[in-house]
Image (cartoon, rainbow, N blue to C red):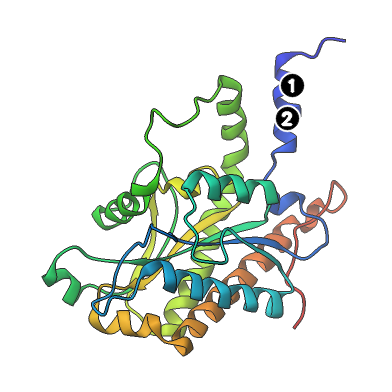
Amino acid sequence: MMVRPLALVLSLASLLAPVSSRAAERPARIVVDPGHGGAKEGATSPKGVLEKDIALQIARRLRTHLEKDLGAQVLMTRDEDLSLDLPERVEFSNKQRPDLFLSIHCNAMPTKRTRARVQGLETYFLSANASNATARAAADRENAEAPSARQTRKQSTLAFILQDLERTETHQDSSRLAYAIHPKLISATGGSDRGVLQAPFYVLNGVEAPAVLIEVGYLSHPEEGKRLSRADYQETLATAITEGVRVFLAEVRKRDTPRRAAGPQVAAPSTP
């Protein structure tokens, strides 16, 4: 029996529906991605503290809170000082079929004057165009580890069609996730609010789930760099991100409730 091309596309698209709307009544499955690792050190504080280490420390604390406070199932792209390419992070995440993807990073400024002045928190979701020069600079810095265009695998026309069908709601949910997390971070830390921004981050582009990249502060700033190294401040960050995820999951579950008769529902945080 022949399958018409359009029917094939729609059939495959149904398999690629946003994870948030196809998840069964089970713990939320969340991938946490500590940026950099191994030889890829990322930003450096005035005292020589490395972004790769801070990101991993915060990610481990975040995993603990997501598991304990929300009952989530958490998988980490790395749980040690390991070099991991950006395509490997994306591939790992998609194999897990997660409900959410959270990438943890620290920001930095390039000059002595801006290092002394610029601090604050930013939360990003994917866009082809950066919100502003700051967002573009952040994406360029994080994307420096991405493969060149010649190395990336060419995609078929069908793959592009499926991505378009899939990404509409996923992109909207990424925006909702960013706006759920960011206010919690600012309220909890009292840090400078540099906003929810959009940028073409490589690691967000391929993830088949609502995904955000969180710049938890400027490691290059003398005072903020010190705070990011403190265990109590890292706990504050992890708790705030967890509360933002709780808000997002509750919103998505409420939105998807009318779909009960049509299919499985979004994972929801368990009651602590």
Q: Position of residue 41 (x, y in %)?
A: 36, 62
Q: Residue furthest left?
A: 113
**Which SS class for mark 2?**
helix
Give yes or no for contact between labels 1 and 2 (Cβ–Cβ under 8 Å).
yes
Q: Which residue is mark 2?
A: 12
Q: Is residue 134 left or right of residue 35?
A: left
Identify the image quadrant of residue 128.
Answer: top left
Q: Is residue 116 left or right of residue 60?
A: left
Against 257, is 193 above or below?
Answer: below
Q: Residue furthest bottom?
A: 232
Q: Position of residue 267 (x, y in %)?
A: 75, 62
Against 108, is 93 above or below?
Answer: above
Q: Residue furthest top?
A: 2
Who's the residue at 39% across and 58% down the image? 39
Q: Residues within 10 Å of mark 2 (few under 14, many from 20)?
A: some
Q: Nearer the viewer, residue 212 or 104?
A: 104
Q: Nearer the viewer, residue 177 or 156?
A: 156
Q: Which residue is mark 1?
A: 8
Q: How many marks?
A: 2
Q: Residues within 10 Å of mark 1 (few under 14, many from 20)?
A: few
Q: Quadrant of the C terminus?
A: bottom right
The amino acid pointed to by label 2 is Leu
Q: Nearer the viewer, residue 172 or 219?
A: 219
The amino acid pointed to by label 1 is Leu
Q: Position of residue 193 (x, y in %)?
A: 34, 73
Who's the residue at 26% across and 72% down the image? 220
Q: Is residue 162 left or right of residue 29?
A: left
